[in-house]
Amino acid sequence: MTAVGRTPFRSGAGRLCLDFVRTLRYRGRPWDQEELSGDDLLGDWVRQFGPWDAATHLDQPGRVEQARELREAIAILITCALGGGGARSCPAEARDAVNAAAAAAVPTPELDAVGRVVHRADSVVEATLALVARDALDLVSSSDLRRVRPCSNPECQVLFLDSSRPGRRRWCSMGTCGNRAKKAAQRGHVD
């Protein structure tokens, strides 16, 4: 759950690590947009994508730079792995950064007194980043990597996991990039 009045982060990339990489919008463009610009926004992302309930207290300020560094290492790892040489061709610095984050303790599930599963961690942010890093390691070493695609919108280009049966999905989201492309195509056919 995000803070009151804030727009939730974009989701739907098909993997936790890909949703995390999306927090830098328009990557590689002069107009890129940082969505993790402070600890409060990192906390919102952690609450939205982690296994935490709304009451989970995030008491680890000062982690946003660490999170952004991990995000960039994951982006390098995935991009490099997609480049044909696989994960073994990735720079050691990116691999080491993701491995180090993945080594942290992950959230521990437990059953509470009313029968709900809740998650605990000494460091909620670090535990969530460990989940993200582990997901990235799994992705670059699995057959799922073959289904990671960039969005066909040249302004977007975010990576997503194509889980469609035929494997021909083109857009990160039909609701945004796909609809924009359809509208542009219709305008092109109008006399």
Image (cartoon, rainbow, N blue to C red):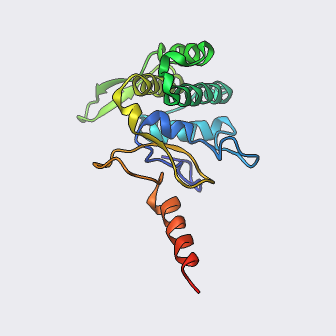
The vertical placement of 184 against 40, above or below, is: below
Identified at 46% across, 62% down, the residue is 175
Identified at 58% across, 16% down, the residue is 97
Query: Does 10 sit left or right of 91 as displayed?
Result: left
Query: Does 188 sit left or right of 110 as displayed?
Result: right
Image-quadrant location for residue 134 = top left
Query: Does 95 sit left or right of 143 as displayed?
Result: right
Q: Nearer the viewer, residue 29 or 136?
A: 29
Q: Nearer the viewer, residue 28 or 38?
A: 28
Identified at 59% across, 56% down, the residue is 5
Q: Position of residue 109 (x, y in %)?
A: 32, 25
Image quarter in which the C terminus is found: bottom right
Q: Residue furthest bottom?
A: 191
The vertical placement of 102 against 182, above or below, is: above
Q: How many marks?
A: 0
Q: Nearer the viewer, residue 56 or 13?
A: 13
Q: Position of residue 79 (x, y in %)?
A: 55, 31
Q: Residue furthest right?
A: 30
Image-quadrant location for residue 89 = top right
